[in-house]
Every structure is written in structure tokens, then in C-alpha cells.
Image: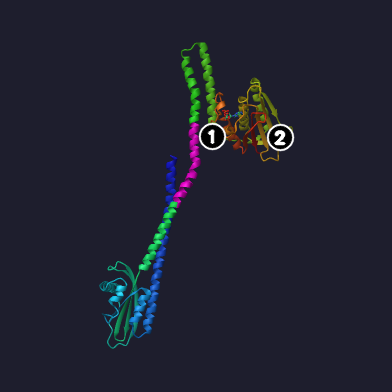
Amino acid sequence: MFRKAHFLFTILCAGSTTTIMVLMSLLYLRVSEHNLQDNYFSSFQKDIGTIVSGLEQSTYVSIQWLSGLEARNSYLIYVIDNDKPFLYNTLKDTLSHGFDDSSGQSLLMESLSIFHSRFEVETIVSPNNSYFGIDHFEYQFTSSVTGEPYYSSLIDLKRNQTHSQIVILNPLTHLQAQITRQRLLFAMLDLIAAVVFCVFSWLFTGKLLKPLQQNHENQIQFIAAASHELRTPLSVILASSECCAHATAEEQTGFFHTIRKEGIRMNTLINDMLTLAHSDANRFLVERKNAELDTLCTNAYEAFEPLCRQKHLTLSLTLPEVPLPRCLCDPERIAQVLSILLHNAVSYTPEGGQVALSLTYSQERKTAYEIIVSDTGIGISDAEKKQIFNRFYRAEKSRSTKGHFGLGLSIAYDIVTAHHGKITVHDNVNGGSVFIVQLPR
Ligand code: ADP
């Protein structure tokens, strides 16, 4: 499920960023190509302007001047003198640009026909006219002969009785090549960026989904462990109730006792699970009041003292000699923590052992209050110390202890954390364990 979600999130993330990027680069390309074409056309017009001013100053058009112009600018130039092709339009020139004579002529005809379709020019010159006039027209067309685009200029020259037309063609192969290069570059950059986005999205969404996945796995483990724990008392209850039907009155009392005991066990487990479920859903209710921690410790001591006596354990209580400032906490929850720690200390300490409960206070410490529960019991190995606060964790040696589900310390941990405090476990120098609960002022 998470793998599929990871994959989909990656596609969504990378897909949306790549689409935005491609759209932006297409927009940029369009503007840039437009500017490039504009610049190219302006520079062509400028060149034509220079040629026209050259023509204005000279009395005739020489072949050397025309061939120099062609060579310098890679232009194709055709001259029509009084409606007849000028001597200059030779095979040599058209071949130098890759056309044979006939295709050169066709190109010229095509350019002229496009010119006539777009512009209207007076071409008749009266025989007695001493008029001098020069006009030029620039336009773009794509040749059906060569299949290539051209900028074309027609310079219309009327001088005395002669009428010349100079057609200058600028093949746009350079511009096309530049545009193609730019498009390829952008396509390559887009492709690289798309790959980078994919990798980044995969890592990013993976990181994002990790806590969710962990949570989901924890939930599955929790449900599996909870069902396992509930199944044991439930099967005992079912078996006992079935046996009740054929049992004697005396036996029935025994079965009822077992059913009640297992029912209480289930009730405790369900309450613990509900507490943790509330904590997981961030609905852990902490009702803070000004509480006297020393009173809470005394109450806990009094509650566990009979049990310790019964188990032949020594239970001691050490409180500060001076009265303590009240602690802003949920007294019921803190009492629950004390009960969990003392219950564990009593459960995991063999007969004749010692359990000690103490409370210290120091204004200098950030966590001013410290509740310490120590015992001289079986102790906790370093490997176990890392796991005991996990849900349903029970050390192998304590599995046989009935009424222990491995939830107590996780509940204690959640309560203390909700109070912005800290709970830690250490080895007792006399053997056994020491649990320290630190609470802020
Ligand atoms: P449980 O209900 O099994 O005691 P806890 O969450 O309270 O669950 O404790 C988890 C495990 O930590 C216990 O199963 C036990 O192995 C270990 N543990 C807790 N307290 C002590 C202690 N005082 N001495 C030794 N082991 C302890």
C-alpha cells in the first residue's frame, strides 16, 4: 500500500513540477524565438538600408559591388534591368548557394510573385523622365522550390529612363539552425530537470511517508499483540463457562472465580489500550492542577505497603524535609505513573528485596521535581532498556508474570511526556533497577 502511495506521490510531485517547468520553458522559447526573428529581420532591414544608401550615391551598379555584397552576407542577389535579367545573374552565383540556374530562377520568380501579391508599385517609367527614385520592400516567405524560409528585399530603382529591380534573398538557414540548437538545449535541460525532479520527489515523498508507514506498522503490531493478549483470558472464560454447565456447585464456584479474575484482567488490558489509543490520537487528557507531589508519593506508598509486606519486601519512602512548592500537573495521571512503577518494582523483585520511593526538588534544575523508584530486583539489561517503553514489550523472563501485558511503561512514558517531563531507567548499584521521573516546575 505504502509502496504504491510512494510511487503515486512521486509521479504527482515530479509530474506537476515537470509540467510547470516545461510550460515555462516553452513560453520562454517562444518569446526568445520571437525576439531572435525580430532581431534578424531588423538587421536584414539595416543591411538593406546600407545597400540602398550605397545605391543612391553611385551612378551605376557594378558587378564587383554586387558579388562583394553577396559574399559578405551570404545573400542571393538578382537584378532585373528594364524587365530583363541583368548580366550579373549568372549560373556561377546561383550554384555557389547550392541552386542550379533553374532553381535560382524559380526562387527569383517566386519571390517576385510574392512581392507583387503583397505590394503595389508603379513600374512604368516615361521615356523623357529624369526622375530619380529608390524604394525598398522587405518581406518573409517560405519557398516551395527549396522548402526553406527567406527574408527578401526588393529594391526598386528608377533612374532617368531605366527601371531596375534588385531582389536580395537572405536564406534563414543560420536562424533556423540557431532556433533548432536552442530547442534541443531546452529539451535536454528539461529532460535532466525531470530526472532530478523524479529522484528528488522519490526521496522527499519517501521521507514524508516514513512516519506514516512507521505509525501504520505500529498500529498493526499493536492490534496483533492486543488480540493475542485478549484471546488468552477470553478462551479461559469460554472454557470455564462451558464447564459450568456440567460442574457440581462447588466446582461452579471455582469456575465463576476464574471467569471473574479473567474478566478483571481483560478489563485492565482494555483500559490500558484505551489510554494508549487516546494518547496516539493526541486526545490524551491532562488536567493540570496545583498538586502536592509529596502527598501523591505518600498515597502511593500507603497503597503498596500491604502488598510489599505480603511479598516480604521492604518499601521505603523518602521526601524532602521542607515543604515543596506545588507542581502543576494532573495528579491522577502522576499517581498512575507511580502505581505502574511501584507495581513493576514489586513484581520484578524477589522476596526479601527492597523497593524505595523518593522525591527530590531543586529550584536550579529545569526539571525541578524528581521521583525515583528503585528496587533490588532482577534488573534490566542494556538491550532491554531500549525497548521497555515500547508497547507490548515484555522481557522474556517476565512473560510468565500474569497480569503484565507490557503496556505499563508505555503508558507511564506517554503521561510523563504529556507533562513535558522525562522518564529514564538506570541500573541500581545494589542490583535491580532505578526509574527516574523528571517533571518541570
Ligand atoms: P509489564 O506489564 O509487562 O510490566 P511494562 O511496560 O510495565 O509491562 O514493563 C515492560 C517490561 O519491562 C516488563 O515486562 C519487564 O520485563 C521490564 N521491567 C519493567 N520494570 C521492571 C523492573 N522494575 N525490574 C525489572 N524489569 C522491569
> Which mark, by number, is residue 118?
none
Specify the quarter for ligand 1. top right
Q: Is residue 20 visible?
A: no
Q: Earlier in the sequence, mark 2 or mark 1?
A: 1
**Residue occupying image coordinates x 34% and y 81%:** 64
The stretch of residues the image draws in magenta is 196-223
> Percent from the top left, x then y, of residue 160?
31, 86
- Above or below, 267 against 370 in this view is above
Q: Examine the image and state in which quarter residue 414 appears.
A: top right
Identify the element where label 1 is drawn: helix
Q: Is residue 314 visible?
A: yes
Crowd rating for badge 2 (residues with CA inside 10 Å; few <14, some 14–19, many 20+) = some
Looking at numbered disc 2 in the image, what kind of residue is underneath it?
A: Leu
Reading the image, the residue beneath label 2 is 324
> Percent from the top left, x then y, of residue 301?
66, 26
Total labels: the figure holds 2
Reading the image, the residue beneath label 1 is 278
- Residues 217 and 125: in front is 217
- Above or below, 247 against 297 in this view is above
Crowd rating for badge 1 (residues with CA inside 10 Å; few <14, some 14–19, many 20+) = few
Secondary structure mostly seen in the magenta stretch? helix
**Residue occupying image coordinates x 37% and y 65%:** 177
